[in-house]
Image (spheres, grey):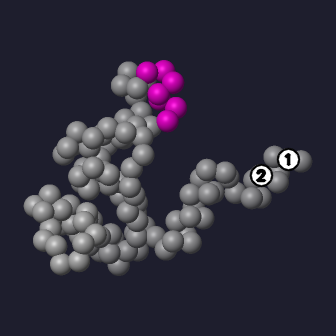
Amino acid sequence: MRNTVGSVLSRRELVELRRLEFVRHALEEMKKKGISQDIPICPNCKSFRVIQITSQVDLGLLGALQPAYYCLDCGWYGRTLIVMTNRPDSDAVHRDMIETFGNDSEMRESDS
């Protein structure tokens, strides 16, 4: 997006902003219902219609170890994407660390 003050947004930028606003509103509604959610966003077109590809047929034998993503709207394909969440920052970071590295008490037990 442009950084100039007072510029008019392009049609593409308006579509991207509408998509992001739609996702933000959906996350707020889920949060009101007590649902924590992470929604993947395409880094190219900002669509939420992103699917995860993990099949060995699609990615090859070694590719299945790290998932790839595909955007149904623009055809973007890659391994890194944007994630919008309604979790508090500290909660989201903490859960990601536990999922990646395990709980601290689990780590201590495995060292013994």
> Would you call the spot at circle 1 few (<14 residues within 10 Å), some (14-19), or many (20 or more)?
few
Q: Considering only vertical position in the picture, is 100 above or below 54?
A: below
Label 1, on which residue? Answer: 111
Q: x%, y% of residue 72?
A: 22, 42
First to last magenta residue range: 60-66
Q: Considering only vertical position in the picture, is 23 above or below 72?
A: below
**Callout count:** 2
Q: Is residue 102 shown to the viewer in this render?
A: yes
Q: Quadrant of the N terminus?
A: bottom left
Q: Considering only vertical position in the picture, is 84 above or below 34?
A: above
Is label 2 in a helix, a strand or a loop? helix
At 27% from the left and 41% from the top, the residue drawn is 76
Looking at the picture, which amino acid does disc 2 mark? Met
> Looking at the rendering, which quadrant does residue 74 occupy?
top left
The front one of 109 and 87 is 87
At 59% from the left and 53% from the top, the residue drawn is 99
Q: x%, y% of residue 40?
A: 35, 54
At 10% from the left and 61% from the top, the residue drawn is 11
Numbered circle sitting on residue 107: 2
> Looking at the rendering, which quadrant does residue 6 occupy?
bottom left
Q: Is residue 64 magenta?
A: yes
